[in-house]
Amino acid sequence: MRILHRLTSYAFGRWFPLLLVLGIAGSITSCSAIQGYPSDPNDSSAVLASLQPYFQPSEMDTYIQETNSAQRQQLRDIIVLSQVRAYDIEFNNFEKSLYTSGNGISTGSDLVLLVLNGLGATLGGAATKAALAAASTGIIGAQTAISKDLYYQKTLPALLAQMEANRSAVELRIFTGLSQDDTKYSLLRAYLDLDALQQAGGIPQAITNITQQAANANDASQARIQELRSLGFSSSNSSARIRKWLYSGPKDSKGKPGLDQTNFDALQHWMNEDTTDPVLKNIPVEQFVDGNDPGLEADRQRALADAKLKIP
Amino acid sequence: MVCGTFTITQIAAEDVDGVIARYKANKPPPVSVTKTKAPDGTWTVTATFPPCPPNTSHSTGNQ
């Protein structure tokens, strides 16, 4: 009995900190499922069911057989707007499900890992620390296994934004069409745009758009770098001021001020960190300082105005 | 990352050493820096950095 008590006390004392940490992490994890959207007062399922008749082929027949142009246009508007509404609801549901699953993935394991790493160094003896390290390693392994999910989570906002942009573009086309006469924007024409609206809310099209945009931006950046490869020597005031600032170091043997490496490094750092003109990180400092180019001149003016560099 | 070849032309004689020094002070530094005198008396300085990766469209600057 005494031995059993000792064993219980030993085990409790040794493992209690670890159990406590895992318990805290688990409770944090269970709280991480936050609703990202307000509650919808509409019963979207009921609304979708009420809109289903407007997807029936018979609606098209009714439209085609209608000879009164005003009635025909009214039919077109009702059918198209009903379908747009249905696609909107479906897209909202899709977006919510993406957002919810995206946030749910790995958030828990991230928090557990943070807790283990953060408290592991301070709690318990060597055995507890070893156990915490093992648990932490296990979680890292699990995270590697779901790295695809993590990637998905990180790229989700960009995908959602692109899907919304794609849908807005198609909806604009539809609403512009509906403002026109039925003879100019028929229901048949609108159906093509409605199909496009459905496609616009999908991930594949969003990925295609984002990839294309990135490729276009890269091409533009590379072309710009190519333009800057060979430039005339700039005699502008901005170049002269930056040159003087760069040469505020100790004087050389001829009594000329030497290159101030600290200022030079600060300028290169500024160029590397600049987000206004992303090509600056891909050109030498000298090209920036002395290149006779209107774009570089604007960049030099920004450098001169930046209080971080303190160029007199 | 700076790669390929960069050139500054029409440099006055009193400025050419400064241009060379500033190219050489770049981090990482160029593989080589050369100067040539133009017929009009000005100088051209060419700095050659490591070659650009093959997937960059400005790889002509490597030459």
Image (cartoon, coloured by chain):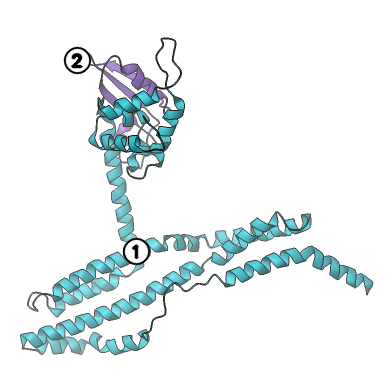
Give the residue at x 20% y 80%.
Answer: A80
Mark 1 secondary-structure assignment: helix
Q: Using the rendered view, name the quadrant where residue A247 is placed.
A: top left
Give the residue at x 15% y 76%.
Answer: A178
From the viewer's perspective, is residue A101 above or below residue A218? below
Give the residue at x 29% y 78%.
Answer: A87
Mark 2 secondary-structure assignment: loop
- Three-letter code for the amino acid on which mark 2 is drawn: Asp
Q: Is residue A183 left or right of residue A227?
A: left
Looking at the figure, which quarter contains the C terminus of chain A?
Answer: top left
Chain B image colour: purple
What x and y, as percent, mark residue A44? 36, 84
Q: Which mark is residue A161?
A: 1
What x and y, as percent, mark residue A297? 26, 34
From the viewer's perspective, is residue B6 above or below residue A79? above
Chain (cyan): A
